[in-house]
Image (cartoon, rainbow, N blue to C red):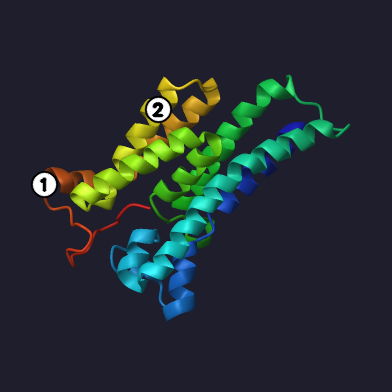
Amino acid sequence: MIFWIASVAGLATAYLLGSIPAGYLAGKLLKGIDIREHGSRSTGATNVLRTLGKWPALAVLLVDVLKGAAAIPFAGWYYSWLGTLPSVTPPTDLQTLLPWAVCLAGLAVLFGHSRSIWLNFTGGKSAAAGLGVLLALSWPVGLGAAAAFGAVLALSRMVSLGSMVAALTAIALVCALEQPLPYRLLVIAGGLYVIARHRANIQRLLAGTEPRLGSGGRESKAAS
């Protein structure tokens, strides 16, 4: 029982890490605004770019990537530490359990980013946090996804399209490379979650009305 309570506390910590609303805080600190009332109404780096400028957007992007990346080593350390406590008895071998714990922590940080408890369970699209998770989990997969995002963004100037292609690329790479089953499931579930968060963008892409970076238009609920 103690192990399961401690496990829930660990996942809650990963969720709270993901829920840090960097974009919202940037709006409040720099201009005294709620960024959810401006531009695309997203707290992600794309809306920060349109509303506050490139340097605040870069800072928000960095924070969002780092909090996603931090959840993975945190989970590894936390559950390894639990295994050293005499009062905590894992239900199975810790080395078997650890990849699954990391998987759940990765999903928790993504959910925290998109459903922040500090913003009435609103937030961004989890693309940047997802990149951080990928880089910490398997840097070749993370770099491959980042490269796919950059290529699509350069060709289309659509952040949303780049984010979805990056998610699909990550899924393909994690299935092609030698990775533990829990890590594969994390990337598949996380990638599909990021894509699902872009459903409004998908509708606009199909209708040919999705705005592009630099077009001067609003990119409603853009990626990040």
Relative to 172, say whether 60 is above or below. Answer: below
Residue 98 location (% of width, % of height): 66, 28
Q: Amino acid at mark 1?
A: Ala
Of all residues, the one furthest to the left in this rendering is 208
Along the line of sight, which residue is nearer the eye, 155 or 181? 155
State how far apart marks 2 and 1 are (Cα). Answer: 30 Å
Which residue is painted at 53% across and 61% down in the image? 118
Task: Tell me the residue that label 1 is attached to.
Answer: 207
Along the line of sight, which residue is nearer the eye, 45 or 189? 45
Q: Name the quadrant of the N terminus.
A: top right
**Res. 192 image quadrant:** top left
* Residue 219 seen by the camera: yes
**Res. 41 image quadrant:** bottom left
Task: Tell me the residue that label 2 is attached to.
Answer: 173
Earlier in the chain: of badge 2 and badge 1, it is 2
Residue 86 location (% of width, % of height): 89, 31
Which residue is painted at 43% across and 56% down in the image? 122
Along the line of sight, which residue is nearer the eye, 60 or 5? 60
